[in-house]
Amino acid sequence: MIVSRVYSRYRHAMAILLTALAWAAAPARAERDCTAVPGIVGEIDSFLAQAAHAQGAGSGTMPIDAVLFGVTEIGPEDRQELDTRDRVQLQRRTASGGDYANRGPERITVEGIFAERETLFRLPELILGRYRLEPGGATLTYDPDHTVEVGERVLGIPFFMEVGRMSVSREKLAFYFSGNDGDEPDRCYKVE
């Protein structure tokens, strides 16, 4: 009887672990498999315009919400935590790019809906990285020690992946998790 219960718990724990690992280690999706995210083209346009304006001026700021495109249904407590963060700072370093930074009083986890899925965003106290503007888009590359993590719950347990870089355009939003230096994103979304 005891052996049966232990074996049953072991199988249950292994099923949870394997499900989580399957999500976390999912292979990069081909562009044709991008998930559609309707209604975010305006948010993307606004982000790209604010970034271009800051680049042209030599520096600038934008609210943290400007980089959470398409995230809806953020609860009141998470909203309060987001509101404690400074504005995102952009500082031109080259003709086409520069540095970005965002600071808050502490690391927070924000829950919302993105691409019709419950999604978690873990923001460290300090977010740092570099941006590069290109025709019709931008690439954000996070400093490995100050990166944002995205996640979701699997059987109620939150699992996160560090974002190494993000590509943003009017057509596509692509996430490349840390360690993915290739051309195929780990998560790909069609901007609509």
Image (tube, helix red, strand yellow):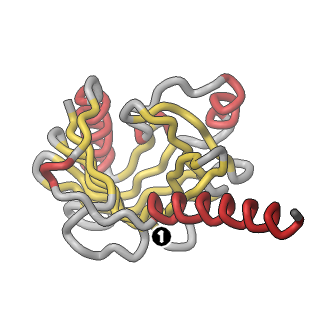
In-image side of 137 versus 128 (left or right): left
Taking the view exactly as shown, the residue that stands out farthest to the front is 1
Q: How many marks?
A: 1
* Image-quadrant location for residue 4: bottom right
Residue drawn at the location 50% of the way across and 61% of the way down: 161
Residue drawn at the location 40% of the way across and 57% of the way down: 91
Quadrant of the image for the N terminus? bottom right
Any part of residue 165 in sight: yes
In the image, is residue 44 above or below residue 176?
above
In the image, is residue 65 above or below residue 95?
above
In x, y percent, where is residue 171? 15, 41
Taking the view exactly as shown, the residue that stands out farthest to the right is 2
Any part of residue 128 in sight: no
In-image side of 45 versus 92 (left or right): left
In the image, is residue 17 above or below residue 152?
below
Front one among 17 and 120: 17
Q: Which residue is tagged 1?
A: 143
In-image side of 75 versus 98 (left or right): right
In x, y percent, where is residue 19? 52, 58
Front one among 17 and 117: 17
The amino acid at mark 1 is Asp
In x, y percent, where is residue 34? 21, 46
Front one among 61 and 57: 61
In x, y percent, where is residue 146? 56, 66
Circle 1 Cα neighbour tier, 10 Å, few/some/many (<14 / 14–19 / ≥20) = some
Quadrant of the image for the C terminus? top left
Residue drawn at the location 17% of the way across and 39% of the way down: 170
Give the secondary structure at mark 1: loop
Front one among 97 and 114: 114
